[in-house]
Image: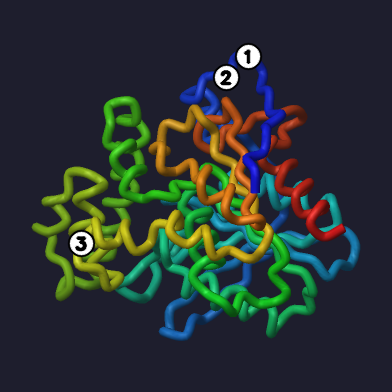
Amino acid sequence: MPVIESTYKPPFYFKNGFVSTVYSGLIRRISLKQERERITLSDGDFLDLDWSFSNQKTNKVIILLHGLEGHAQRPYMTGAAKLFNQNSIDAVCVNFRGCSGERNLKYRSYHSGATDDLEEIIDHIIKEKNYEEIYLKGISLGGNLILKYLGERTNVPKQVKAAIGVSVPCDLNGSCKELHKLKNKLFRDRFLKDLLFHLKEKQKAFSDKISLDDVNSIKTLLDLDNVYTSKAHGFKDALEYYEKCSALQFLVNIKVPTLIINALNDSFLSPECYPIKEAKKNSNLHLEMPNYGGHVGFIDKRNVYYNEKRALEFINKITS
């Protein structure tokens, strides 16, 4: 599909990618009532799903996936859920393993390619709920996960009608290199601090699998993926994890109408994260690259973000 020309024009002071990213992550606020559902996974672990509902009965639902060290109450999750609720679509904001405020039960956690958990969520919703149409929207890590899910399998349920990925690190190795550059030091340090806090808690419960010395040896995000993420999820090392879980290689196979919105001034993304060639070869893949927006910072009027409005427009167009 030809690359979509973006119409996004933020206020002048939010044209700076750093400013829009920080504002959206730390300042934005959304009020939304949610109801929590806990589901048990096939391996005995659990996931917490936070639901919000339309004021009228509907057979449509959007599944929202957060980014690295996010959760279901992040404004980029609740903002999208609120907009879809206002447009007669229920929403379920997923908390990945260990991200709902309670440590998960297994040594493993979540990662950029954990499509087995997304598959179980979708299967649960199809079996236990009465939705005829399911939409998927993922932010950053969650976007990579959705794209990989759609492209790696031939049996995507017929109820899944459309998908949107926002600020997606389609090439994990390239994105990791960008995060380790000086320009991203503040973001990188915050990610690492949060990840290490949770890993230290996990180490106490699984001291037979990872030692405190192992945890203390971690100085970078790459170290963390080498020491924990890769080993806990069946990969040899970080590079194998990045190689096998990057969505870029799966985009050619996507058959569900899908929109990717990646800002050109997103400091987290490498050139490989803008899949122009793949979009041109796949009629189901729509790529929009606004000049502005930073990383999940598509600030717009009345506290409804551009990427949220575009997701709704895309779904309405696909399903009309």
Marks 2 and 1 in Cβ contact (< 8 Å): yes
Q: Which label belongs to residue 15?
A: 2
SS class, disc 3 = loop
Using the numbered discs, state the Cα–Cα distance from disc 2 to disc 1 in whole angstroms.
Answer: 5 Å
Residue 4 spot, x, y in % from top left: 67, 38
Q: In which quadrant of the rendered image does the C terminus lie?
A: bottom right
User: SS class of the residue under badge 1?
Assistant: helix
Q: Residue 280 carries which label?
A: none
Query: Which residue is pictured at 50% across the width and 36% down the height?
Result: 295
The residue sitting at the right extreme is 56
Residue at the farthest left position: 213
Kindly indicate the quadrant of the structure image that contains residue 184. top left
Q: What element carries label 2?
A: loop
The residue indicated by pointer 1 is: 12
Residue at x-position 22% and y-position 65%? 203
Which quarter of the figure has residue 123? bottom right
**From the viewer's perspective, is 238 left or right of 21?**
left
Kind of residue sitting beneath label 3: Asp
Quadrant assignment, res 193: top left
**Is residue 205 at all visible to an observer of this figure?**
yes
| Display coloring | rainbow
Q: Give the mark nearer the N terminus: 1 vs 3.
A: 1
Q: Name the residue under label 3.
A: 237
Q: Tell me: residue 177, above or below residue 158.
A: above
Q: What residue type is labelled 1?
A: Phe
